[in-house]
Amino acid sequence: MLQPASPTFFQRSALALAPALLGQWLVHRLEGAPPRVGRIVETEAYVGPHDKAAHSSKGRTPRTEVMYRAPGHAYVFLVYGMHHCFNVVTGNGSAVLVRALEPVMGVPRAVRTDGPGKLTKALGLTLLQNGLYLPTASLFIAERTVVEHQHIASGPRIGIDYAQEWVNKPYRFWLRDNPFVSVAKASGAHPPRRRVPG
């Protein structure tokens, strides 16, 4: 039985939640269809308004207002007018971006989920899910096993060249040797994605 994580699961800093989300399941229950479920294998922490890579660094706006809600809210935004990105809010202008999933159910393993825009498309996430409270919504995190520290790697976040001294902060976390982790062409932080049979 898939059950949402309790509010207390989210009550930690973005830097603590980002690795804690690894191995947990992201679940989207769609009306009249089986749930779509993916195991979280890669995340990025955005630690607040002082983090120049965080959206909240540009000020408190209608777009970023959700980042100041209680921990456990969903922050979904659109990039390039076409790709949705899903984040878990940790409050005070901070959040964790979910970057990659390993399909579990309702999503064929041949479907690409190795990137933030790919995983939201696979799970059917749009701006309609922005602002949902994950402990009580049809979109939620289901707690699974805790991943041991030695199975987690960390390194710089991706695509934030504008963030000045924050560019090289090791705020991206992923499961070592997982073939669904997104490919960062210049990071050298993990091996190339292996081809996975469909």
Image (cartoon, rainbow, N blue to C red):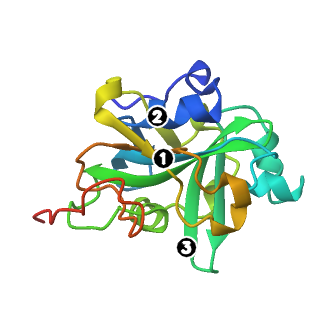
Residue 171 percent coordinates (x, y):
55, 44
Residue at 46%, 48% (x, y): give it: 155
Dot 1, crowdedness within 10 Å: few (<14), some or many (≥20)?
A: many
- Measured in 3D between alpha carbons, the distance from the residue under mark 1 to the one under mark 3, in whole angstroms, is 17 Å
Report the amino acid beneath label 3: His
Count of labels shown?
A: 3
Whether residue 152 is visible here, answered yes or no, is yes
Residue 80 percent coordinates (x, y):
62, 80
**Residue 136's quadrant in the figure?**
top right
Report the amino acid beneath label 2: Pro
Q: Is residue 197 above or below residue 97?
A: below
Q: Is residue 16 left or right of residue 144?
A: right
Circles 1 and 2 in contact, beta carbons < 8 Å: yes
Give the position of the C terminus as an image quadrant: bottom left
Going from N to C along the chain, the mark reached first, 1 or 3, is: 1
- Measured in 3D between alpha carbons, the distance from the residue under mark 2 to the one under mark 3, in whole angstroms, is 24 Å
Label 2's element? helix
Dot 3, crowdedness within 10 Å: few (<14), some or many (≥20)?
A: some
Residue at the disc numbered 2: 19
Residue at the disc numbered 1: 43
Going from N to C along the chain, the mark reached first, 1 or 2, is: 2
Q: In this view, does 44 lie to the left or right of 39?
A: right
Residue at 41%, 27% (x, y): give it: 143
Residue at the disc numbered 3: 83
Residue at 24%, 49% (x, y): give it: 178
